[in-house]
Amino acid sequence: MALGINTIRLTGLVSGMDTDDLIKTMMKIEQLKLDRKNAAQTVLKWKQEAYTNVSSALRDFKYNFLSVTGADSLTKESAYNAYTASVTGSGANAVTLSPSVYASVGNLAISSVDQLAKGASAASLEKVSSDPNGLTAATKLKELNLKTDLSFDGSGNISFSINGESFTFNEDDTLGKMINTVNASNAGVTMGYSQITDKFTVETKTKGVGQTLTIVNKTGNAFSDNGAFGMVNVAPVVSGAVKDKNGGFLSSSDFGTKLGAFLPAGGNNSLFAIGKDELSFEINGETFTFDKTDTLTDVINTVNSSGAGVNITFDDATHKFSLTPTGYDGKLEIKNKSGNIFGASSALEIDSPSQRSSYSGGQNALLTINGVQVERDSNSFTLDGIDFTLNRTTAAGEEIFATIKKDASAVIDNVKKFVEGYNTLVKKLTELTTTRKSTSEKDYLPLTDEEKSAMTEEQIEAYEAIAKKGVIYGDAGIRRLLTNMRSALYETVQGTGLSPSSIGIKMGGYFDESKDQIALDEDKLRAAIESDPEKVMAVLAGTDSSGGFLTRISSLIDTYNIGSGASNLDALTDRLKSASEDIEAFKEKMTALEEKYYLKFAAMETALSKMNEQTSWLESLMGQSSS
């Protein structure tokens, strides 16, 4: 057809007529018909868009407020079981308390926070830098101003492992890169350097007794004993091979013998001083005393279970005792007080060592609550539905008192969020079904493409905002939904004897502009919560045997979405398909009619051309005759 039209358009040269303009004028009535069809289709699309928005708004509201996964849902127990913790006392800032939904109302007395949980750690024993300003993270490793120079291998690297995770750094890497790499690894530690203390630290992220830290220096001297980072690892103190009085070697089978009958081969014939029935020694500041009726097993078990931070073991193969520091301070100081279990020429052949280590074992948090000592392997833990965070230890005499009570304000805030969401939804649905064009706006019909081409985007948007008014005005399904939602607020919830309006959640006046929106009486709701919070939850969320207000709203939304809402969208989909097919068929008819007009004009041009040729021929004959 296009070739024919282009050929036909050339014929206007004979008649001198504007064929395109003439045909366009002749097609105007058909174009008007097409514009009306397109406008009707656009209105259908607007309706489809409006109904889709309604369904989306209902689904979003249901998810946010009526589902167990919604952030502001009132169907969750946590929305009603809110508690506050009022902490007072001279040590109030030592502990932070956050009651959960499972907390119980009552009082707590924390008489002391004796110890914070810590991970196994290592720290520089002394300041490591020669610069009074300390080290900076941006400094290259080879340029660190350390008291003990950092040495590298032949490739300019240092390497070490922490808890089995290996690390290698080049001399041109920065201190910050080394620390960040270690902290982001699977070693499970936090490494740091402080300009305040001028010391390096490494601590396991997991805290508590039993945590261990193993640092192995491989190349260079970063973590070697008395190396560049100033850390020292104390090996266990090991006794000599212990013999009994007969010169034979001691074995663990002898540990049940009473100390009074135990005569080791040593400088004395007895563990006890002459005329004394007790022996005594001190490990890391903790004193131990035993009498002649105790056994070596008693000694070992007592020391190992104490807070001295040391572990005593015995090796039957070597007949030697080992004392390994396990305490957080990493020290091992032994002082003999009476008897000769320790000291020169003692039974264990350990001459009161005093050593200091950079390495320390983990420790648990210790505190006393309501007279009961509590031990935990973390500074953050939960007891009786209350989240505890220990911030510091308390000094002697400092006390902490806490009162746990229901937080009505938090519940009211949750209900207020629901009310705001509910009213926003209702306002939107009400406006869609009650707003229509004014008399002056009735001529705002969908724009044609030609009309849009003469307007800006802003003008089109403003125009269509008016043109779309009332596309679902008076929709029966939405109006019915609003009416049913209103009624649900006045229905009594089975098992409670109350309705939402009974606890302060009521509708506006019937003749008010906002009659379908909720008006919240906070004082009435607060009184209901403080009186019986479980009943408030039952009224809104329902009971085991019956649904509450929220359940009814959720059911009404479902009924609409699978009923009239779905029917509207299905019907519109069918109508849009039919409209689209009708428009395409009409366009084909217009194309055929336009081609018909062009062919007729082409025939006229051909006839005029032949007429002109005949006239010229006759004129030429007449000219010849006169001559």
Image (tube, helix red, strand yellow):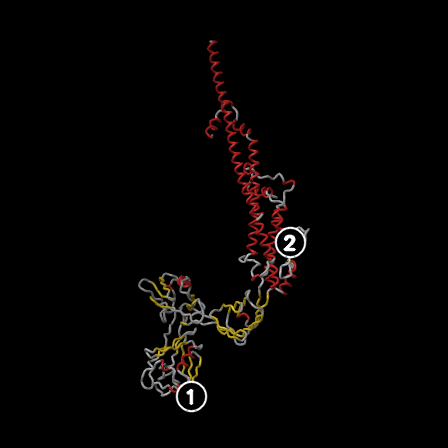
Q: Amino acid at mark 2?
A: Ser
Residue at the disc numbered 1: 277
Q: Is residue 137 visible?
A: no
111 horizontally vs 299: left or right? right
524 horizontally vs 259: left or right? right
Of residues 562 and 626, the one nearer the viewer is 562
For residue 320, above or below residue 464: below
Assess whether mark 1 and mark 2 are in contact (beta carbons under 8 angstroms): no
Cα separation, mark 2 vs mark 1, equals 89 Å
Of residues 54 and 330, the one nearer the viewer is 54
Please identify the quarter of the rendering in which residue 68 is found.
bottom right
For residue 247, above or below residue 24: below
44 horizontally vs 350: left or right? right
Across and down, in percent, residue 92 comes to: 55, 71
Q: Does dot 2 land on a helix, a strand or a loop?
A: helix
Of residues 190 and 520, the one nearer the viewer is 520
Q: Does dot 1 land on a helix, a strand or a loop?
A: loop
Across and down, in percent, residue 251 comes to: 34, 81
Q: Amino acid at mark 1?
A: Asp
Of residues 308 and 199, the one nearer the viewer is 308
For residue 485, above or below residue 173: above
- Judged from this view, the residue extending furthest toward the bottom is 275
* Res. 487 mark: 2
- Judged from this view, the residue extending furthest toward the front is 545
Please identify the quarter of the rendering in which residue 263 is found.
bottom left
Across and down, in percent, residue 604 comes to: 51, 22
Across and down, in percent, residue 303 comes to: 42, 79
Q: N-terminal of the two: label 2 or label 1?
A: 1
Q: Nearer the viewer, mark 2 or mark 1?
A: 2
Q: Residues within 10 Å of mark 2 (few under 14, many from 20)?
A: few
